[in-house]
Every structure is written in structure tokens, then in C-alpha cells.
């Protein structure tokens, strides 16, 4: 992994140094003796190489020096300036020389990238640990998404079932209410009819003279068996009223009609339901 960044930087540095040395010798060789030009070129390359080596030493120790970095970039700019000046003063191939004038700065930039890579590089164990943590997080996220989707589907199914069941119950209740309403309407119409009153009067008049029956709507609730009528003589209205009043007010608060009728028959008295209810109504009134 290290060679991916250090190899391009080293190659670019070598090419740049050779090019700088060749340009200096070619450019200054005509004005000064070639050994002097060679010394100048080696001085530029040597200064650049020395600062680069010192920067690499500091980087290996985890340190950094701004002055050394500034000197290194100064040598890079000097080499680039020499290449640009030679390209400008060259009689032929000026464009080619300008095209390679950026090589010293490019080499410095590649070493900068390599230094950044070194400061952020991790060991194989650390990379494996990071990969494991990322994979674990992805697994947990996938499991959480699957759990949420399953819970959402289950909740949707449950709501659908509850809604359908509630709709069925509502339809049954509506039909039952409609049937009960029709039955009660029929009973109410029968109770209010003139023929019903005459029929009940013709039935109850032989039993209880001077009493006109009134048909009340039935009360929904538990019913109690009525004891069989005994052969004892029927009570008069006054005696029946007195018994009903006595039983009704035997406790405080007064008993209801159903409780009074139960105690009335439990005491051995006998009277028809119509007479007993009529006596109750007279006492309440």
C-alpha cells in the first residue's frame, strides 16, 4: 500500500532532478565552463534532495518543521523557474520545455500527498476492526428494517381483521336493532289501537267489574314463575289495596312492583296479575 504513493513521488523527483541538471548544464554551459554549470545544477538538486530527506525524517518521527518545508518549496520553485527561463530563451522546442517545467512542483506535490497518506494510514488490524464494526452496523440496520417491516405487516393484518370483525358486528347489530324496532312499533300500534282496548275490556270485565284493562308493553328481564291460583275466595279491591300497601311499605325505601308481587304470592295470597298491577297503580297514585 505504501508504494502506491511513494513510488510515483520518487520517480517524479528523479525525473525532475535529471531534467533540472540537464537544463542548467545546457543553459549555462555556453556562458560559464560546464563544471561550473554542473555544480549549479547539482546544488539545486542537492538542496532539494537534502530538504526532502530531512522532511521525510521528521515525518517518520511524527514531527513537522515549517521552515524546512518552506526551504524545500523554495528549491522546487527555483528549479521550476530555471526550467521556465530556459524554455522562454530557447530558440526551438519552446513549447516542449514549457510542458515539462512543472515537474519539480509536481514532485513536491506528490511528496505532500504521500505525507498525508502516512499521517492517515492504519494498520491491517485496525482496518479489519473498522470493517467489522461497519458490517455489524449494517447487519443491525438490516435486522431492524426487517423487524419494522414485519411488525408493520402484522399490525396491518390485525387492523384489517379487527375492522372486518367490527363491520360484521355492526351489521348484525343494525339488523337486530331494525328487527326490534319493527317489533316494538307493532306492539305500540297494537296497544294504541281501539280494537285492542275493546278486546281486553271484554276479557277482563267478567273477572274484574268496573275495571278497564290497560295493556302495558312487556318488560325485558328475568321472569319469575307465578304460583298457581288457589281455590280460596278472591280478595276484594279494598283488601287487595290494603295488602299491597302494607307489603310495599314494609321496608324503606318502598319496594318495587316486582318485589312486592313476589312477597305477595309468597305469603299465600292470590290475585290475577291484572288486579295486582291495578292495585299497585292505585296505591302509587
Image (tube, rainbow, N blue to C red):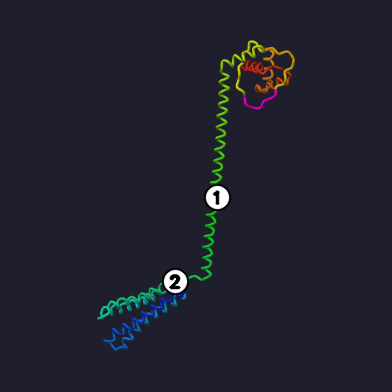
Majority secondary structure in the magenta region: loop
Q: Which residues are magenta?
A: 219-225
Residue located farthest toward the top when viewing the structure as drawn: 210
Q: Nearer the viewer, residue 185 or 233?
A: 185
- Left or right of 105? Residue 166 is right
Q: CA distance from mark 1 to mark 2?
A: 46 Å
Question: Residue placed at 67% from the left, 25% from the top?
Answer: 223
Residue 58 at what x, y percent from top left?
A: 44, 76
Place residue 230 in its image quadrant.
top right
Q: In the figure, 93 relative to 241: above or below?
A: below
Give the residue at x 45% y 71%. Answer: 119
Q: Is residue 160 left or right of residue 119?
A: right
Query: Residue 117 has which mark?
Result: 2
**Quarter in which the C terminus is drawn:** top right
Residue 192: give x, y in percent of width and height. 56, 18
Disc 2 element? helix
User: In which quadrant of the rendered view does residue 235 lie?
Assistant: top right
In this view, the residue in front, 23 or 190, is: 190
Residue depth check, mark 1 versus mark 2: number of the one nearer the observer? 1
Q: Is residue 38 part of the magenta span, yes or no?
A: no
Question: Dot 1: what SS?
Answer: helix
- The mark total stands at 2
Q: In terms of depth relative to the viewer, which is nearer, 70 or 200?
A: 200
Q: Residue at x 64, y 16 (%)?
A: 278
Whether residue 276 is situated above or below residue 38 in the rendered picture: above
Residue at which label 1 appears: 151
Location of residue 169 in the rendering, given as x and y in whole percent from the top left corner: 57, 36
Looking at the image, residue 231 sits to the left or right of residue 144; the answer is right
* Image coords of residue 120 (percent x, y): 46, 69
Amino acid at each position: 500500500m505504501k508504494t502506491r504513493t511513494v513510488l510515483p513521488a520518487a520517480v517524479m523527483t528523479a525525473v525532475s532532478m535529471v531534467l533540472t541538471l540537464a537544463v542548467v548544464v545546457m543553459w549555462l554551459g555556453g556562458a560559464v565552463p560546464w563544471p561550473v554549470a554542473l555544480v549549479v545544477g547539482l546544488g539545486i538538486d542537492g538542496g532539494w534532495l537534502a530538504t526532502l530527506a530531512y522532511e521525510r525524517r521528521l515525518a517518520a518521527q511524527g514531527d513537522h518543521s515549517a521552515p524546512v518545508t518552506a526551504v524545500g518549496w523554495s528549491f522546487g520553485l527555483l528549479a521550476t523557474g530555471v526550467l521556465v527561463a530556459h524554455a522562454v530563451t530557447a530558440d526551438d522546442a519552446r513549447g516542449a520545455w514549457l510542458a515539462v517545467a512543472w515537474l519539480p512542483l509536481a514532485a513536491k506535490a506528490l511528496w505532500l500527498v504521500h505525507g498525508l497518506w502516512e499521517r492517515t494510514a492504519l494498520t491491517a488490524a485496525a482496518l479489519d476492526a473498522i470493517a467489522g464494526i461497519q458490517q455489524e452496523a449494517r447487519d443491525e440496520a438490516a435486522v431492524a428494517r426487517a423487524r419494522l417491516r414485519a411488525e408493520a405487516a402484522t399490525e396491518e393484518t390485525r387492523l384489517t381483521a379487527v375492522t372486518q370483525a367490527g363491520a360484521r358486528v355492526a351489521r348484525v347489530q343494525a339488523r337486530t336493532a331494525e328487527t326490534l324496532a319493527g317489533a316494538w312499533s307493532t306492539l305500540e300500534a297494537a296497544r294504541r289501537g281501539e280494537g285492542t282496548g275493546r278486546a281486553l275490556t271484554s276479557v277482563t270485565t267478567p273477572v274484574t267489574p268496573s275495571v278497564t284493562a290497560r295493556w302495558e308493553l312487556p318488560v325485558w328481564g328475568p321472569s319469575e314463575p307465578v304460583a298457581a291460583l288457589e281455590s280460596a275466595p278472591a280478595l276484594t279491591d279494598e283488601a287487595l289495596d290494603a295488602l299491597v300497601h302494607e307489603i310495599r311499605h314494609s321496608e324503606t325505601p318502598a319496594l318495587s312492583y316486582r318485589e312486592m308481587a313476589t312477597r305477595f304470592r309468597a305469603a299465600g295470597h292470590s290475585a290475577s296479575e291484572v288486579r295486582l298491577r291495578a292495585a299497585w297503580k292505585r296505591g302509587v297514585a
